[in-house]
Each structure stands twice: as structure tokens, then as C-alpha cells.
Image (cartoon, rainbow, N blue to C red):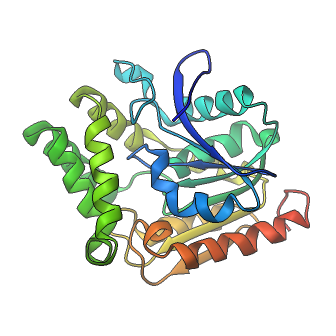
């Protein structure tokens, strides 16, 4: 994968296709590879871009908790768009990437077309805080590989282990090969728990689609409903099954929903109907 110096940091990124730009922001795993089921589909019509988060994959991994916050990841995304000479992009974010997309929509609305938030949250509640704290404790007690394996079970779920096993193992192996230090894993989980733009979500004025999954054990579906209610004019699509990685496990269905939404966006001006 190519790397680009955006000033504060050097990012590893992926790019495919031509046309309007689609910026895919990964979740806590932080790997652009997680969007492999989307790149092959959307690159037929769009210029698809994604990147490895700071602290993940082949991007720089600066030490220090002060280097990890969802607003810094949003700044990285803007730096990448600048480096690639992209003035405006539709943004699609999952989980932590959805938090990054919230920051982009609130702080950099002029750089965005439409927004898609999938399986993400507004602000951590007790359920979410306990779950992520347990992930951190597993990393602290058993090391980065155990953290990756537990995270893989939690986010993929049993159906993907059964029916998409090779893809699950390939993504898990890449994560193990590029995993950060324990200090950075801790800082990135704390980054998730600290994210809270709940009181500002009403400021989002981009055309928005929110996607959730009933059986998502990582990010409960009620967060998608909350996000939808907070963003005026947003659309909501709920899958009954698909787990946290619905965009991977149900890629054809997920892609079709987003395709329809983007087709609607192409006829508008980027603002809610």
C-alpha cells in the first residue's frame, strides 16, 4: 500500500476507481482492508479511498495517549484528502470510523457530500463502556494477539466465522502482523470511550444515512436509532441480522442500501431533504 506524509503523520492508504470520491473510515481495527467487500463494488462508479488509522496497520504509530482521539483521526482524514487533492468526498464510517465521520460532518461540512454512519454510537453508555473495558483488560492480561482474537470473535460473530472463515482469518492475520504496542491499544480504546459529540449532532446538515443491525453485540442497535433521531432529515436502515460487521457479512445487501442512498444524493445538493 502507498504511504503519504500529511504533515503531522504518515498514513498508509488504499485507492481504487474513478469518479466522485468515497472516503471509507474503518473502525477500531483501523485497517483499510476491512472495506475490501466495498472497494470491489463501489470502485466501478466512484473513487474509493480508505486508510489505516494512526496507530494501526502500516500508518505511523506515535507513542503517547495524547496522540489518539477521534478528532485527530478526522484531521488525518482531511490531511489525506488534501494530499490526494480531493476537495469534497462522501464519507462512510463504521464504528470508531463513524465517530470520525461525525467529527468531519460537524467540523468540516464543506469537505463532505453525503454521510453514511454504520454500526456506530453517539456516546459511550454503561454497556458499551464495560464491553470496551473488558477488551482492554484482555490486551493487558494476555497481550495484543489475544486482543485481536477476542475482537475478531466479538465483531465478526459466529455466522462470519462459519461462512466467511477465510476472509475472517485473513483480516485477523493482517491485524496481528501490524498490531500496535499495548500502550497504543489502551490509548485507542480510551479514544473510543472519550468520544462524545452528542450535543452537536444537530449541527450535521449533510444528507445522512444511518445503518444499524439488531444482532450487533458490539454496538447496540439503539445507538443507530439515537443517531438517526439526532440528525434532522437522516434516513435509517436496520438489518435484523448481520452482526457488527454487517457491511462484510451482508456485503451485497449493505452495498445495495448504500448504492440507493448515493443515487438519491446525486440528484440533490448534499443537504437533507
Residue at horizontal 45 percent and vertical 54 percent from the top:
34
Q: Residue furthest top?
A: 7
Q: How many marks?
A: 0
Quick one: quadrant of the C terminus? bottom right
Q: Nearer the viewer, residue 194 or 148?
A: 148
Going by the image, does 224 lie left or right of 65?
right
Going by the image, does 34 lie left or right of 168?
right
Residue at horizontal 57 percent and vertical 69 percent from the top:
211
Q: Residue furthest bottom?
A: 240
Compared to residue 120, the image places residue 220 above or below, namely: below
Compared to residue 242, the image places residue 68 above or below, namely: above
The image shows residue 181 at horizontal and vertical percentages of: 24, 28
Going by the image, does 85 lie left or right of 92?
right
Q: Residue 235: tell me if it is visible.
A: yes
Going by the image, does 174 lie left or right of 88?
left
The image shows residue 143 at horizontal and vertical percentages of: 13, 38
The image shows residue 157 at horizontal and vertical percentages of: 29, 70
Q: Residue furthest left?
A: 141
Residue at horizontal 81 percent and vertical 70 percent from the top:
263
The image shows residue 31 at horizontal and vertical percentages of: 44, 44
Q: Nearer the viewer, residue 198 or 35?
A: 35
Q: Residue 126: tell me if it is visible.
A: no
Compared to residue 2, the image places residue 28 above or below, namely: below
Residue at horizontal 45 percent and vertical 29 percent from the top:
59
Amino acid at each position: 500500500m502507498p504511504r503519504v506524509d500529511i504533515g503531522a503523520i504518515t498514513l498508509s492508504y488504499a485507492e481504487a476507481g474513478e469518479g466522485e470520491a468515497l472516503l471509507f473510515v474503518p473502525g477500531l481495527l483501523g485497517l483499510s482492508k476491512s472495506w475490501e467487500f466495498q472497494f470491489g463494488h463501489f470502485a466501478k462508479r466512484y473513487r474509493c479511498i480508505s486508510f489505516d488509522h494512526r496507530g494501526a496497520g502500516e500508518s505511523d504509530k506515535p507513542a503517547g495517549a495524547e496522540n489518539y482521539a477521534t478528532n485527530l483521526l478526522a484531521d488525518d482524514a482531511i490531511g489525506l484528502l488534501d494530499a490526494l487533492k480531493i476537495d469534497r468526498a462522501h464519507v462512510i464510517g463504521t464504528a470508531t470510523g463513524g465517530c470520525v465521520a461525525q467529527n468531519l460532518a460537524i467540523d468540516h461540512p464543506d469537505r463532505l457530500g453525503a454521510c453514511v454512519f454504520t454500526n456506530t454510537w453517539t456516546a459511550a453508555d454503561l454497556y458499551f463502556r464495560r464491553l470496551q473495558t473488558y477488551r482492554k483488560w484482555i490486551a493487558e492480561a494476555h497481550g495484543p494477539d489475544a486482543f485481536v482474537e477476542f475482537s475478531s470473535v466479538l465483531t465478526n460473530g459466529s455466522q462470519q466465522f462459519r461462512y466467511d472463515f477465510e476472509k475472517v482469518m485473513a483480516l485477523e492475520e493482517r491485524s496481528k502482523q501490524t498490531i500496535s504496542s499495548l500502550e497504543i491499544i489502551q490509548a485507542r480504546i480510551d479514544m473510543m470511550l472519550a468520544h462524545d459529540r452528542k450535543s452537536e449532532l444537530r449541527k450535521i446538515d449533510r444528507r445522512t444515512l444511518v445503518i444499524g443491525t439488531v444482532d450487533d453485540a458490539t454496538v447496540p442497535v439503539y445507538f443507530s436509532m439515537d443517531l438517526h433521531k439526532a440528525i434532522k432529515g437522516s434516513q435509517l436502515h436496520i438489518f435484523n441480522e448481520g452482526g457488527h460487521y454487517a457491511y462484510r457479512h451482508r456485503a451485497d445487501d449493505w452495498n445495495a442500501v448504500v448504492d440507493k442512498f448515493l443515487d438519491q444524493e446525486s440528484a440533490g445538493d448534499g443537504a437533507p431533504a
